[in-house]
Image: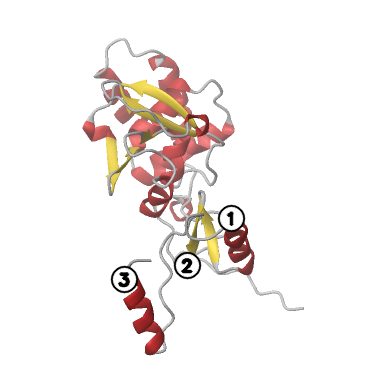
Amino acid sequence: MTDLEYDATALAHDIGMTPRIPSLLTVDDYSEAELSAMVLDGDVFRVGECVSPIDEIPSASLRAAALSTVIPVRLIAERRTAAWVWGAVNDLPARYEVCADIGARTRPARPHRLVIREVVIADHEVVSFDGFKVTNPVRTATDVARVSDHFGPAEVELVARLMRSAGFTTADCAARMEHRRNLPNKRLALERLAEGETRARGIPSFDVPVSTPRGAPRRHQAGEKPSPVRRS
């Protein structure tokens, strides 16, 4: 703890305030056993390998910040890992899917935790969250559709939620791919994206994006009735 953080904590204690818990806590702050106990107590919820206070609002920036604690800054979160940041899936893949610009040179600290691709990628296809980079929703959906070995209901739902929340279509993805010569699997990607677009039309607006990780408090949408409380 820095002197400034100590002073702020001491001041909060002196005036009877509960010190504000940081937005994210990691194993650098507490042991894994302690973090798990905090989750069980309902004080925090899981955000990737981190935890966050129960009153923190789940967001793309919060999820990106969690990933930045385990993924080197020179790599870009892509595919299902990026989809998690955008709230299109609830769970991260077992190995984080990341990419690096083909002209970059980077050696990840924990390569066994990562699936790395070297790609050609433009600046406008990347969104930066305080320096941590994530492929934008259009690039994310296109990559999932184009390079996934398996494209089943889960992948269709992922693409659909990205389209529904970010407001793009198969035509937008096609326009992006047209700028790349000799890009493999274009036709296959368009067929898969069309499946996602069809599914996207059936997703209610209040159900997009999937912004609340498991274990986090769910915020009711306008006009939605909360579930009744069961009393023993």
Q: Residue furthest bottom?
A: 15
User: x, y percentage for residue 63?
Assistant: 42, 50
Mark 3 vs mark 1, foreground winner is 3
User: Quarter of the image containing the C terminus?
Assistant: bottom right
Q: Residue at x 55, y 69 (%)?
A: 43
Q: Is residue 133 above or below residue 47?
A: above
Q: Is residue 190 above or below residue 2?
A: above
Looking at the rendered structure, the kind of residue marked 3 is: Asp
Which of the 4 image quadrants contains residue 187?
Answer: top left
In the image, which disc is placed on residue 3?
3
Which of the 4 image quadrants contains residue 124?
Answer: top left
In terms of secondary structure, where does tag 3 sit? helix
* Disc 2 from disc 3: Cα separation: 47 Å
In the image, which disc is placed on residue 223?
2
The reply to whether residue 211 is in sight is yes
Viewer-closest of 21 and 31: 31
Looking at the rendered structure, the kind of residue marked 1 is: Glu
In the image, which disc is placed on residue 32?
1
User: x, y percentage for residue 148?
Assistant: 50, 23
